[in-house]
Image (cartoon, rainbow, N blue to C red):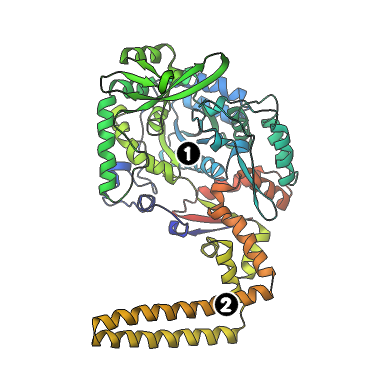
Amino acid sequence: MSTECYPISTLPHVTKLYREYLAMGEAESRLRNWYGAPPLGREWMKPVPACSHAADLADALERQVREFGASEKAVANIAKLRAGARAIVTGQQVGLLGGPLLTLHKAATAIARAKQVTATTKIEHVPVFWLATEDHDIEEVDQVSLLTKNAVETLRLGLKTNDAPVGGVGLSETVGPLLDRASELLGYAPVTELLRECYGPDNSTFASGFARLMARLFAEHGLIVMDAGGRDFHALGARALRAAIEQAEDLEAELIARSSELESAGFHAQVLVKPGASLLFLVSDVEGQPRVKTRQPLKRLSDGTWKAGSGNAARAFTTAQLLSILDETPERLSPNALLRPVFQDTILPAAAYVGGPAEVAYFAQSAVLYDRVLGRVTPILPRMSATILEPAIAAVMEQHEISLPDAFCSPEELAQRLGARAMPIEAKKKLAAAGNALEDALTAAQSYMGTLDSGLGQAAEVSASKMRYQMDRLRRLAATYELNKESSLKKHADAIALHLFPEGHPQERVIAGVWFLAAWQTAKGNSGANLIDLLVETAAGQCPGHLVIRF
């Protein structure tokens, strides 16, 4: 096993906000108003208040994790929470079969940071994985992408819901055929048996299948898997929900001001905050359909009342009625993306949250809610960002002297590069000499024409651009000739792009984590847990950019 750390700019489409966030140093920065301490180093390791409801939290977690098949190490970590330990928290939507590889990266990072801060501060910290079961976008979780020999294959159950919280959605009878196809694509590696155990008929929801899988994969590391969608946890987080009702107008004004601040600084707000849009959803039973829920956004009207739903189905509430719902059935009020981290940290004694680029952007806005509700801002730490290279793909890249940055492009562009590199040395020299001579001549001609007349200078610039284009075209034609002469080059380019940059996105965002567990088992002939250990060990290194992990 080996690793390499590249700058985060190696990844395409990294936002300006995320780049500046990772570059925060000890010196003052405008981002300190939004994030507090830099995400790397030790400054974020400041003690946070102990949990005032530690016993109730531990009781609720113990009841739940037993159902998830948690390890004794996870149960022991819950006992530490009961005794006053703090938490390093991360989370993810409950994607089918565990979701993309970045899910494993998040959990591994939370575990590594919990160990790090415990060793540094001598205060116990435990890793917690928060399941985003209250979201209602079924299409985002009802899919898992695996690799065939030459394509990405996305498996779906094809479920439809009426804006129900996805965690409680039952898996249909088609989960059996889906598991069969997944097993084929995973080469019947040992992890396929684990998937059947977790997503079998006794584990019939997105939440329970995902929770069991994560609990089993990270059993040796004591990861606490938590679904906060029930009454017990919502009662513990009622402070944040109450603030969203009672202080709605003030919170809205502060969020709009923060959005303006972000935009003035050259960034963009991750969540568009509109006047009247609240931070809450209302969860209700669907009439005539037992056990079916719907989750509708609450809107605050100008007269001080609230509305859930639209059209003839819309329902109106007074503030007093919403507060009554919170007191009697707190699980019916669900936080939106901006309030969710504050709600989470009202329940948990969170010392830090581990998130990806989008969550980092959310936190820039959520900070105003933290200040108002909790009186402090929980630090957010970057999850490990990594590409895993299997032996076969690594060998092809070495053969063609392709590094990771070279691979973040389309298969066609990568094939052109391989074709160019495959040209005979003499051909490369001649093309290079011609290109250099042309560039020197064009630069001199443009300069001379510009001294004669500005119009002539502009005409020379246009003509030179056309000639440079034709020179590039000659290079592409030569590279294409090599591609056509040696068909393996195109196949190699396709394979590299498929594994490292599938469908134009980094591997970690598309391909399922279980695919890499299966690949590890096939390559190493041992349990997938060893790859989990490797990810935790690698996350401890705190690469400030993007990693390459080689089997």
Task: Name the residue beneath numbered marker 2.
Answer: 477
Residue 462 disc label: none
Residue 214: where, in percent of width, then height? 60, 35
Residue 232, compared with residue 93, is above or below; it is: above
At a point 44% along the width and 88% down the height, the residue shown is 437
Q: Are marks 2 and 1 in contact (CB under 8 Å)?
A: no
Query: At numbered mark 1, what does the secondary structure look like: helix, strand or loop?
Result: helix
Along the line of sight, the residue nearer the viewer: 333 or 137: 137
> Left or right: where does residue 177 sit relative to residue 75?
right
Residue 320, compared with residue 414, is above or below; it is: above
Please rate how many residues cluster around mark 1, counting C-alpha atoms within 10 Å: few if below 14, some from 14 to 19, many from 20.
many
Residue 511: where, in percent of width, then height? 60, 47
Residue 73: where, in percent of width, then height? 59, 31
User: Disc 2 marks which amino acid?
Assistant: Leu
Residue 191, compared with residue 524, is above or below; it is: above
| Distance CA(mark 2)–CA(mark 1) | 54 Å
Task: Name the residue beneath numbered marker 1.
Answer: 114
User: Disc 1 marks which amino acid?
Assistant: Ala
At a point 38% along the width and 85% down the height, the residue shown is 442
